[in-house]
Image: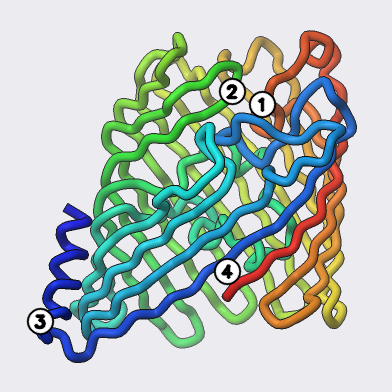
Amino acid sequence: MRTVAVLAALGACAFGACAEASFTFGGYGTLGAVRASTDEVQFRSGPRQHKGADRSVDLGVDSRLGLQATLHVDEVFSAVGQVLASRRDGREGPQLEWLYVQSTPMQGLDLRAGRLVLPIFMVSDTRNVGYASHWLRAPNEVYGPYAHTSFDGAQLLWRSSDGPVNLGVQASAGTSEAPLFLAVRTDLKYRRLYSVAVTAERNAWTLRASRTLGKGATFSGTPVPSGDDTFTDLGAQYDDGRFIAVGEYIWRSYSAMGLLDHAAFYVSAGLRLGSLTPYATYARFMPEGLSFGVNAPDGTTRAVGLRWDVARNVALKAQIEATRHSKYAFVDPTPAFTARQPSVRAMSVAMDFVF
């Protein structure tokens, strides 16, 4: 249905029915390299990656390329497509990330249908755009547990200004499925998905809250029973152009015996000194459900890094972090690693760009 709508719009333009139509094209990318402090486990950027970095330098953990095209049919109708090439879902290559049609029937209101961004986090819209963030990668303790980045369905976006305050609401409904590489590979599927996100902006401040409900969640190839998966996110950011500070707190509840219940948070801050931005991040994952084990320890990451805006639309970054007890950042552990659970250090460099 998404493809039919887009082709219909293109066909109409081909026969001169939309003289105002225009195309815009852009993209983003990251060239990254990561080296971990051990060969007993592999370090990765999230649970949708089937492999990561060990003591050998790995170029696939953070490297990606995204291409986006927008068809503006007129002032009301448009269509957007985005392809993302990265290491994800057991392969390294292009995947369709977004493909949707949009109607703007009135100022401040957008109606969308197709494959859409899932607005869970503070930076969901730019989660894959490294250039848009001060850090090299988002904290796995918060962004790892909910690895879905898009869904198939419909979305309403409403925006309004009340004096100095800008308000926004995103309401979404549809379905979503994504493979996860944890102890085993599993496909997490939400038979029905509902999400609401509310954002308020005033001067340098941004506040955000979202709640997402996945009805009839199933985990293929695992003993986890089907249930309803509820994910709540609260976030705040301060950015006055020189100093940036951001934090998010999440909690998850699973209706089937609370097997996946947990909470997590991170705080990150950076200071822009001309073209340089040193920053630091602390993140903690607090397991509660029995799927994490009895008396499972908290997972933590401590990271410091530097961003250098070396040219227009190009930034170089370096980051050093120490991570411990993370089922989302680690994959393919040896028995020795599982027994000792040591801290793993990861050293990363990346070049982010947009065009």
Question: Circle 3 sits on which residue?
Answer: 15
Mark number displayed over residue 168: none
In the image shown, does 6 or 258 lie closer to the viewer?
A: 6
> Marks 2 and 1: CB-CB under 8 Å?
yes
In the image shown, does 183 or 268 lie closer to the viewer?
A: 183
Q: Amino acid at mark 1?
A: Lys
| Mark 2 or 1, closer to the camera | 2
- Where does residue 355 sit, x and y in percent of width and height? 57, 76
In the image shown, does 14 or 170 lie closer to the viewer?
A: 14
Using residue 162 as the reference point, say whether residue 3 is left or right of it.
left
Question: Circle 4 sits on which residue?
Answer: 206
Neighbours of disc 3 within 10 Å: few (<14), some (14-19), many (20+): few
Vertical side of 218 occupied by 136: above or below:
below
- Where does residue 150 sit, x and y in percent of width and height? 40, 49
Mark number displayed over residue 327: 1
In the image shown, does 260 or 149 lie closer to the viewer?
A: 149
- Where does residue 258 sit, x and y in percent of width and height? 48, 19
User: CA–CA distance between discs 3 and 1?
Assistant: 54 Å
Q: Earlier in the sequence, mark 3 or mark 1?
A: 3
User: CA–CA distance between discs 3 and 4?
Assistant: 45 Å
